[in-house]
Amino acid sequence: MVDVLIPLSVSGVWYPYLAEDLAQSGSIGITVLLEPFSYAKVRNGEGILINGEKVRLDNVEYLSRKLGKVKVEIETGVPLGYGYGLSASISLAYALGVSEIKGIDPYLAVLEAHKSEIIAKNGLGDIVSQYFGKNIVYREKPGFPPYGVVRSFPIDSDNIYSLPIESLPTTTILKPLDVSFELIQDFLQNPTLERFFSVSKRFTELLGFESKYPNSFRKKGLILKFGEPESGSWIRHRIAKRGAYVE
């Protein structure tokens, strides 16, 4: 059995890029990686369980064909389909687990995880961010390294909260907006947590997602907030200082 830990991934600004070569597909953007980590147990067998409930995912179907079958049991504190990068977390757990069990090069296994997310029309930058990045991640060039280029900013905080609202398909937010590049440059000129939230709010509002809470933005089906909320059933997070790893 293999234990894999994977941070959550919430993007604030992104520009999707699809190419014929899936390794060159992905997105330019900025993302924050968050704790608590999702914890996966991977072993010989078949099937995916999230918090004890069996699920079927197109990305996993792809991985089982490419890498072989394994069983993944993942425990997580957030729901699937809300914008936490949980689909990519499962793909990463599968890839890193099968790499250990079947002796597959981890780079090649994670590359297949990246491809699986694109084929399934899930997140275009989560795998790259969660595996190669830490803290706040800037995907400078789209795709899987060496095509993709990833930079991380050593920003830390344990004062971030999220509120799951509704499950939405990722296709609802994969819209190319040219303003993405301007907002990313705005962040890069002053790479602070406050600026990340500011540019993310401006970007997501242009996509039609608004949050009524101060110092917050809505990404897909969740609201991410900097600073303690006054009320409500929020989930508290710390910025993750490392990407996914085998324990």
Image (cartoon, helix red, strand yellow):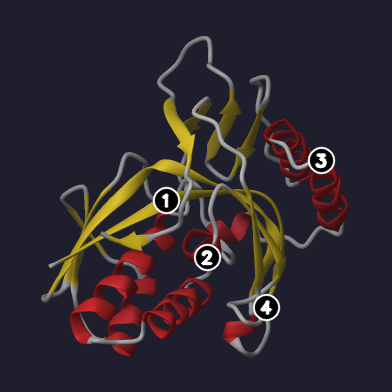
Front disc: 3 or 4? 3
Residue 18: image tag? 4
Look at the numbered discs 2 and 1 and tell me whether their residues touch, using CB distance below 8 Å: no
Question: Which is nearer the N-term, disc 1 or disc 3?
Answer: 1
Question: Element at badge 2?
Answer: helix
- Amino acid type at circle 2 is Phe
Question: Which is nearer the N-term, disc 4 or disc 1?
Answer: 1
- Amino acid type at circle 1 is Pro
Residue 7: image tag? 1
Question: Which is nearer the N-term, disc 3 or disc 2?
Answer: 2
Q: Calculate the distance from the C-alpha at mark 4 to the C-alpha at mark 2.
A: 20 Å
The residue labelled by disc 3 is 190
Residue 132: image tag? 2
Q: Residues within 10 Å of mark 3 (few under 14, many from 20)?
A: few
- Amino acid type at circle 3 is Asn
- Residue at point 86%, 53% (across, down): 179
User: Which of the 4 quarters of the picture holds residue 178?
Assistant: bottom right
The foreground one among 213 and 131 is 131
* Left or right side of 35 for 209: right
User: Which of the 4 quarters of the picture holds residue 89?
Assistant: bottom left
Q: Is residue 149 above or below residue 22?
A: above
* Left or right side of 8 for 99: left
Question: Element at badge 1?
Answer: strand
Q: Quadrant of the N terminus?
A: bottom left
Question: Element at badge 3?
Answer: loop
Report x, y in % for residue 146: 62, 82
- Amino acid type at circle 4 is Leu
